[in-house]
Amino acid sequence: MPVLTCSIPLLLDDLIELCVAYLRDQLHASNCVGLLLYGKQYQCLPLIEAAQHYIHEHFEDVVRHEEFLSLNFPDLCSLIKDDKLKVKCESIIYNAAMQWVRHDPLNRRAELVEILPCIRLQFLDPSFLQGVINCDEFAPPDMQRCRDYLENAYENLTSHRYCRLPPHRAPIKPLVIYCAGGYFNKSINTMECYFLETQQWKRCADLQVSRSGVGVVSVHMRVYVIGGKCNIRNENRDCRDVERYDPFVNKWTTVAPMIYARNRLGVGTIDHFIYAVGGSCGQQLYSSVERYSTSSDSETWVEVASMHVPRIGLAVCTHSRLLYAIGGFDGHRRLADVESYNPDTNIWKREKSLSVGRSGAAAAPLAECIYVVGGYASDSVEGPMQLDTVERYDTLTQQWSLVRPLNCRRSALSCVTLDKRLFALGGYDGKRFSSVVEVYDPEKDEWTFGTPLTKERSGHGSALTVEPSLENDE
């Protein structure tokens, strides 16, 4: 350190570079804040950048050390509002900021009114915010402005109205698309993932149970595969089974099974809950819905309010903390019916119907809209029964409109949003199982072909979360 201190005013660039390289190798959660402050004191940009990068990558470890509490107010705000800060949940940043305040409450409480806007409260569960609002720290009269700010954030979350969100922070690992299960002459147990940077699909660990007609979601950087039908040589059964994939170790574990076996169900998430919607077991079609909390492995599934209409092959999508059930088949006809579930009231509400009744479609949110892609047509439609039509629901105007159709008509496909685009994966075109991937750019209203799946499949599911740790990765 003394060598660097002397080198900086003398502009000894080579020696500065050697010193910074040495300090970069010594960076640790216990000293990175001190090195950041040292770099700022002597205006050593390479050291500042190295320390900031370390803090961004290891924030959860950094806040456990005393040095973090020595940050001044401007440095704290600059840090916690940075897009590059990597955390598993925004609550980690909230708790770290409160820890900083509690270290010197007499001098720091007054700064809270400016600290709170640096935290992306929009990405917290309403239940977490409600607990914050009700805690003693925000009860005193001098905390009224903070309490008002928190209550406004809570009201926005529970209003179920679309509002433009701040950017997501950098994920702790790059995001990839997972495509799991499905059907190719029999139920399959394979899962693959798509890397946006290399535009390649890679094989992940196989599911424990082969199945098609599944629901797939991601919560807290884990992938869940839910229900479906296991249709293989010696077995043909509807499934209650739920498996959870951990991308950090590339392994599956079994978690609590659903109350009912459900094939061709829809699934979605709100906060830390997974919802399993509709589907069938044998000849029985369900309007029932069950919910699972991912907050504890000891949790079990519980029933919540049922839909107005029983249906299989429905598309399910979450938007603005509402769960949308779209289309499907009620045993007699392909449905255009749409309804939304409010978790705060436990009530389903009928929404404006699709222009084309369909089952086996896929749905995904993007900005203020929900897109419904492909599917199997109403029996009254002339021509091919598999659809290429794509409908868009504007949650602000509550109106449906048609956008550019798919290049390849398909049903039993899946759809996921990545990089502000829709990815439509696989499916069945009426004659063949498909490995086709199409990518929709809403600004151009254009579908282009992406890298195809490594395996044809229909009746699969897809989800987005962090990339896996694979043994053959370099």
Image (cartoon, rainbow, N blue to C red):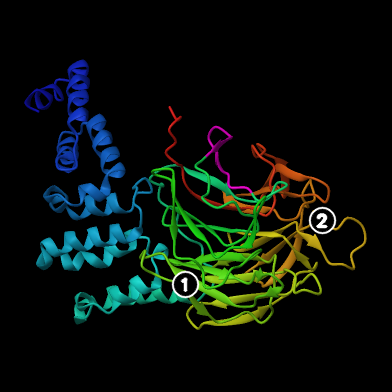
| Residue 412 figure quarter | bottom right
Secondary structure beneath label 1: loop
- Residue 254, x across and y down, in percent: 44, 57
- Residue 228, x across and y down, in percent: 61, 60
196 drawn magenta: yes
The N terminus, quarter of image: top left
| Residue 348 figure quarter | bottom right
Instruction: From the viewer's side, name the closer residue of 211 and 397.
Output: 211
Q: Is residue 6 above or below residue 437?
A: above
Task: Name the amino acid, label 2.
Answer: Gln
Pointer 2 residue: 386
Compared across the picture, whether 169 is left or right of 343 comes to left
Q: How many marks?
A: 2
Residue at 37 percent across and 60 percent down: it is 120
Work out whether mark 2 precedes mark 1 in sequence or the reverse, and give the earlier one: 1
Instruction: From the viewer's side, name the closer residue of 425 and 29.
Output: 425
Task: Name the amino acid, label 1.
Answer: Trp
| Dot 1 crowding, Cα within 10 Å, few <14, some 14–19, many 20+ | some
Compared across the picture, whether 40 is left or right of 261 comes to left
Res 419 seen here: no
Residue at 72 percent across and 69 percent down: it is 327
Pointer 1 residue: 301
Q: Which mark is residue 371?
A: none
Residues rendered magenta in the picture: 188-203
- Residue 53, x across and y down, in percent: 30, 38
Res 321 seen here: yes
- Residue 227, x across and y down, in percent: 57, 62
The C terminus, quarter of image: top left
